[in-house]
Amino acid sequence: MRKIKVLFVCMGNICRSPTAEGVFSNLVSTRNLAERFQIDSAGTHAYHIGDAPDLRAQKAARDRGVELKHLRARKVVSADFEAFDHILVMDDENHAILKEACPVDLSHKIRHFLDYAPHLNQREVPDPYYGGSYGFERVLDMVEEASAGFLQTLQQTGEL
């Protein structure tokens, strides 16, 4: 059985995208679908390569039963465009960076993560890095909604 390969992307890969990786991994695990997925996250910039997620992101996620401490930041590499089926970005800036770097025939894989939560009426997951703990809670709320919507879309389209 072929795995569905999902890559979550933000700028530094220490706040939003590892949160999305952790939340989505947890969601598919609770639905006994983990073996159907390969899930990863990366950043468009190399600011934090090898670092664990921001401690505030880890705490907020852990408070909701999602563990992030085992994750390590990495930068998107050109092989990711071929390797992943879905490349889900957190904001317009990172979307533009990936679209420019991606081969044209693979650019259909790149989407805004919040496209899967249209009821939020927002396209970007805000970067909580320079704010307080509320920002990390807000990111978790958005990521949980988009994760559920993404999984539902995969089921509706027959990909899952």
Image: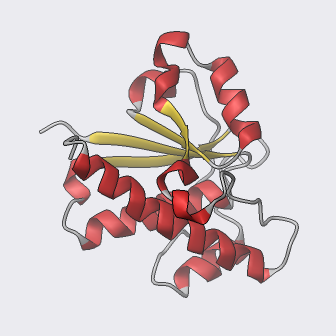
* Coloration of the structure image: secondary structure
**Is residue 62 found left or right of 73 in the rendered image?**
left
Which of the 4 image quadrants contains residue 104?
A: top right
Across and down, in percent, residue 72 comes to 58, 54
Is any part of residue 45 visible from this angle? no
Residue drawn where x is 72% and y is 29% of the image: 97
Residue drawn where x is 47% and y is 11% of the image: 105
Q: Residue furthest bottom?
A: 63
Across and down, in percent, residue 119 comes to 54, 63
142 w.r.t. 56: above or below: above
**Is residue 118 found left or right of 150 in the rendered image?**
right
28 w.r.t. 101: above or below: below
Residue drawn where x is 23% and y is 51% of the image: 155
Which of the 4 image quadrants contains residue 132?
A: bottom right
The residue lying toward the viewer, choosing from 47 and 80, is 80
The residue lying toward the viewer, choosing from 1 and 112, is 112
Residue drawn where x is 70% and y is 46% of the image: 91
Across and down, in percent, residue 121 comes to 63, 60
* On-image quarter of the N terminus: top left
Q: Residue furthest left?
A: 1
Q: Residue furthest right?
A: 130
The residue lying toward the viewer, choosing from 1 and 72, is 1
**Is residue 10 found left or right of 69 in the rendered image?**
right
Across and down, in percent, residue 140 comes to 59, 72
Is any part of residue 150 visible from this angle? yes
70 w.r.t. 41: above or below: below
Total numbered labels: 0
40 w.r.t. 98: above or below: below
